[in-house]
Amino acid sequence: MLTLNRYSWWLGAMVGLAILLGVAGQLGVLSPVQGVFLRVTGPVEGVLTGIFRPVAGVLSSVGEVDDLRAENARLRVENEGLRNELAQRQQDAQRVKELEAALGLAQGDTSQSRLAANVVHRDSSPFSDVITIDRGSNDGIVKGMVVTSTQGSLMGTVTRVTPTRSFVRLITDTRSNVRAAVLGGEGADGILRGNPGRTLTLDLAQGDIKVGDTIITAGLGGAFPYGIPIGTVSSVEGSTQDLFPKVTVEPMTRLGTATTVLVLMSFVPETLDTGAGR
Amino acid sequence: MRAAGWFALVFGAAAAQVTVAPLFPVAGAVPELVLLTVCLAGAFSGPGPVMVLTPLGAVMLGMLSDRDPGLLLVAYLPVVVLGALLEDAPLPLGHAARTYGMTLGAGLAARTVLGVGAMVGGAPAAFGTLATAVLLPGLFVDMLVLTVCYVPLRLAGLEGGGFRLRRGRYVAGL
């Protein structure tokens, strides 16, 4: 105990420093320092990522050969189905255009402006899943903007911005809440939450939800636009008497291995929301 | 010069924590590289460097990631306490046992603090998951990385120092 007593002054000082850091972080006092630090340390991180990412890719491929073969076979079948569906949709779109022209309807601009960004690093403890991208307020990014994969699937939202970097809280982060709905499901919406271990569950969801259903953003609450694909239902547990079944969702994109993401620049989140998705 | 070396080491650990560690998860867990660096510094150089590297590592990792540096600092504090307690403990512990004990205890404490901090911050209060998905695989990975670092250092002839704080020495030693 004598040895420990000698550290008491230091422990006290560190607790005081921790409180100061916590308060400074909440007030945003550290953000300018953080911006400079991230800019200075960027090259080192780039070198480390450049060296180790290929190694991890090779190791990952070796361990997942069987899984990848099975996934490839499944995706081939799915691809064929999607191609057929696409052909049908193209025919439908053409038909809609013809009908709109016949009715004299003006077509609104539905395009979304997106900004591509590279993932520079990732902090993935079981309770948090945050990536850092190489775009910041200098590029027009603001807190709350929605981030998708290059294929358009939802990845997360921007939670903090420095001039050159932004932190993106992924949907698998335990603090993430997204108002989500089942595509084509009558009133089947709920709150998509991240869980420890980077799984997703759709809470408070009622209605007829089946394995394989596609989950999209519901557009409620103003934090996300409607209709961004999130994932597919991988399991539904609970009896018919349960008010809310336990719905597990598999993200459409591999969140952990993404190297490039897209920031939706044209969607400005509501400022007076309840914090959903932040 | 020595201080610059410690600074580079803890910065390298913090940078590797957010760039390299997520690429090599074991059972979904990644090692706490900054914590391991602090523990190894304590094991081989005594408490002086630890008392400087603990806040430095916490702030650096907090800057590089989206974590609260204050919470990280609290999470890393037990390294010094455990090092001192194990030094004083009336047990016939060798240097390796003390190092492994300190790292295991510090890893347990750090992950618990960070997990509880996340729960207070809005994550679901899942203590079972904290134990099975966070603590066990995380501590296993920590021990693995510690062994990979510790054994070669001992084989290279590095002698472990004590953890007893001698007033006036640690500043000069750093």
Image (cartoon, grey):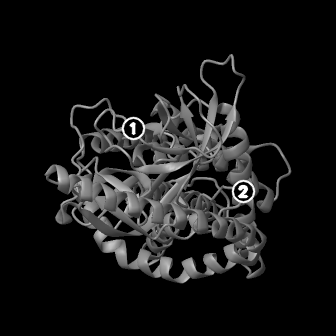
* Closer mark to the observer between disc 1 and disc 2: 1
Question: Which quadrant holds residue B64?
Answer: bottom left
Q: Which residue is mark 2?
A: B27
Q: Which residue is mark 1?
A: A218
The answer to whether one can see residue A16 in this image is: yes
Q: Count the marks: how many?
A: 2
Tell which of A95 and B75 is nearer to you: A95
Question: Which quadrant holds residue A247?
Answer: top right
Examine the rendered structure and indicate whether residue B62 appears above or below residue B81: below
Whether marks 1 and 2 lie on the same chain: no
- Mark pair 1, 2: CA separation: 33 Å
Asked if residue A247 lies left or right of residue B70, the reply is: right
- Output the chain of dot 1: A
Q: Residue furthest right?
A: B92
Q: Position of residue A272 (x, y in %)?
A: 22, 31
Q: Position of residue B150 (x, y in %)?
A: 72, 70
Of the 4 image quadrants, the one containing the N terminus of chain B is bottom left
Which residue lies at the image location 38% right of the left edge and 46% below the top edge?
A227
Tag 1: residue type?
A: Ala
Tag 2: residue type?
A: Ala
Which residue lies at the image location 53% right of the left edge and 58% below the top edge?
B50
Asked if residue B134 lies left or right of residue A165, the reply is: right
- Output the chain of dot 2: B
Q: Are marks 1 and 2 in contact (CB under 8 Å)?
A: no
Examine the rendered structure and indicate whether residue B28 appears above or below residue A21: below
Q: Position of residue B96 (x, y in %)?
A: 78, 62
Mark 1 lies on a secondary structure that is loop
Mark 2 lies on a secondary structure that is loop
Question: Which quadrant holds residue A209?
Answer: top right
The answer to whether one can see residue B60 in this image is: no
Q: Determine crowd level at label 2: few under 14, some 14-19, many 20+ residues with C-alpha closer than 10 A.
A: some
